[in-house]
Image (cartoon, grey):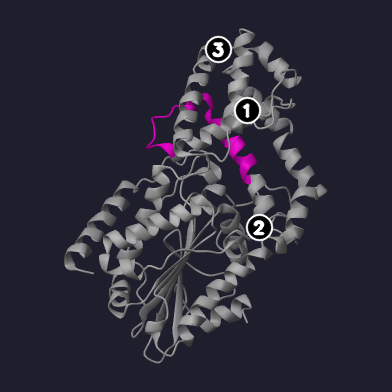
Amino acid sequence: MTRGVRALVLVFALQVVCAHAEGPDRGAYSTETPYAPGRAARRGERPPRGFAPVFTQMVARHGARTVTSNKDLEFTKQLVAFARADNGLTELGAALGPEVERLQAAIEAIGYGQLSRLGKEEHRDLAARLLVRLRDHFERAARERRRVRIITSGKDRAVDSGANFAASLASHDPELSPLIDPPVTDPDLLFFHKQPQNKNYQDWLANDPTLASTLDAIGYGDTSRAYARRLLSRLVGIGVLDKLIAKAYPFRDPKTGALVERDEVDAATSIYRLYQTAPGLVEEGDWHLAQFVDRESARWFEYVVDATEFYEKGPSFAGSDITFKMAKVLVDDFFRAVEDVASRRRRIDAPAATLRFAHAEILIPFAALMELPESDVQASVLYTRRSNPWRGSSVAPYAVNVQWDVFANARGDLLVKMLYDETETRFKRGCRSIRRDSHYYAFEELKRCYGYR
């Protein structure tokens, strides 16, 4: 890395950190929260004397994206049309239709489920900060012609996240550019929840009566109905609200055109989902979706989304591992990557970095299985904000990432340090670091602690 490039990276990274010093508007967006780095700007714990970085690896969720379908957009437009026909729109409600039309136009210009400009920047910025943190490692890797591996789920938003990450590495350090391998697609590793080997999970998700009744009680219980009516009462008159409660409006499925029953909770949820979308599209427009969703209602529907993510993908019910045991393939891949570096007769034959790009459905169970902080507490009673620390906005925001930096000494001893959203983070309880409160762990200790063989 030349002195000029090094200075550029340092200045760039400082600008990024300053821009995010206050973090984005955290709002009530659950897993649609834009990424904010942790304590990336602070100097981390130095490695012990004689140890230097030899490898780094990461798994990250894709960056901010558009909605994956037009369902909530079209259902909300239908609601506005029904209310208008019944002369039941409030002054605020009358502004909802044009805002939805404007949002939909921006989404369709990008494509459903595709990265927004912010989503691309999240991974470009993440790459720049990685170069700053491990500057000496990547300088040495460039001299030794060591490769950088890119692995994705194969889905567009993950592929594009990896491409933007790689492009940022190359632009900030041109010497790395020819060393970045073409991306490899591995759905078994990074889209495992949809693969045939996890059919038991798919069957559980579709058919488990306890899961269904739990989520129904949260999503359609009295509190959800009260908050739905609170949200909608600012947008439509009582007559429209009564019809929604009675499921009297002829909503049609946007995809099939078939009649579908929708009540006040469904209508409010669709509006909340659009509110969730806006922060990820801040560079495509100046959005005003928050005016339609009062703060208390937003917080409640965020809880409903969090509960769904928690039970379907995360720690879930006490005593059950159906949601996260399938992430073992990814945990094992992290361990194998370190073993690969250790086993090479010449370290220059090992990659300098392995970078993986995936989805919330991967990061959430991975965090639970790894027992990362506030990511692994199971529900022995109903999941609530008071009973459990799990939050979608911290466990799986856009671009959430887990990184392992690997250090070696002249004897070949290996130490590993983990960063969770770029914040040095201790491994699970029971893993012994090299000294009290250190973030460095002997690799053999991690193998023992996680039962890796």
Give the position of the N terminus as an image quadrant.
Answer: bottom left
Q: Amino acid at mark 3?
A: Thr
Q: Amino acid at mark 2?
A: His
Q: Of the residues tagged 1 and 2, which is closer to the observer?
A: 2
Tell me the distance, in whole angstroms, between the alpha carbons under discs 1 and 3: 15 Å
At x 32% / y 77%, what residue is drawn? 145
Residue at the disc numbered 1: 268
Q: Position of residue 69 (x, y in %)?
A: 58, 37
What element does badge 2 sit on?
A: helix
Tell me the distance, in whole angstroms, between the alpha carbons under discs 1 and 2: 29 Å
N-terminal-most mark, 1 or 3: 3
Q: Is residue 409 above or below residue 256?
A: below
Residue at the disc numbered 2: 193
N-terminal-most mark, 2 or 3: 3
Q: Position of residue 95 (x, y in %)?
A: 49, 17
Residue at the disc numbered 3: 90
What element does badge 3 sit on?
A: loop
At x 62% / y 69%, what residue is drawn? 329
Pick the front one: 41 or 5: 5
